[in-house]
Image: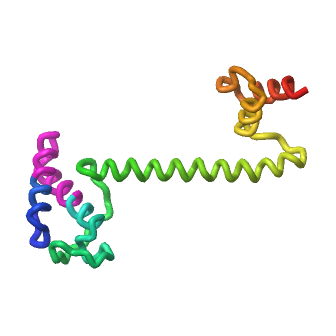
Amino acid sequence: MPQKAWSNKRERQYEHIKEGEKKQGRSTKRAKEIAARTVNKQRAEKGETKSSGSSRSSSGSSRSSSSRGSSSGGSSSKRGSSAARSSSSTRGSSSRSSASRSSANRNGQQKTKEQLYKEAKRLGIEGRSKMNKAQLQRAVNRKSK
């Protein structure tokens, strides 16, 4: 299924991916689909398609890329980095929400496990990583009195 808009490099890439998928036991039809999707996705990422929004075009293509990922080629590393960004943004938001909770805790509300852990660390309480929230609370209360 190599397309006219693909460069020689992309056609070689397509054949390589297709053969790899066939070796993994995929049907010829499915291997062709995966290879084409992968090549089109990478073309879009590199700005080789009209719909990619980039003026950089090495092959003068007129086809748009597929937005769905595949299970082969470079897309797995892309998904990995996306997951890393997602988890780092989650960590960032938890520290922000922790900060907003600490102001609420000054008004007599209970501390979160994360806040108790940080306080236990500051107080030098051993075994804190294996403690649940109630145990952390007791240990912090004992140590701070």
Report the magenta residues as a range: 16-38
The answer to whether residue 142 is left or right of residue 33 is right
x 19%, y 77%: residue: 62
Identified at 18% across, 72% down, the residue is 58
The picture places residue 13, in percent across and down from the top left corner, at: 14, 56
Name the quarter where the C terminus is drawn: top right
Residue 138: quarter of image: top right
Residue 22 falls inside the magenta stretch:
yes
Whether residue 25 sits left or right of residue 71 in the image: it is left
Quarter of the N terminus within the rendering: bottom left
Which colouring convention does the figure follow? Answer: rainbow
Residue 36 lies in quadrant: bottom left
Provide the major secondary structure of the magenta segment. helix
Q: How many marks?
A: 0
Q: Residue at x 79, y 40 (%)?
A: 111
Residue 50 found in image quarter: bottom left
In the rendered image, residue 110, in percent from the top left (x then y), is placed at: 83, 40
77 within the magenta span: no
Locate residue 104, reporting x and y percent: 83, 50
Q: Position of residue 27 (x, y in %)?
A: 13, 47
In the image, farthest residue toward the top: 127
Q: Is residue 62 above or below residue 38?
A: below
Horizontal arrangement in the rendering, residue 12 relative to residue 44 (left or right): left
Q: Is residue 40 above or below residue 72?
A: below
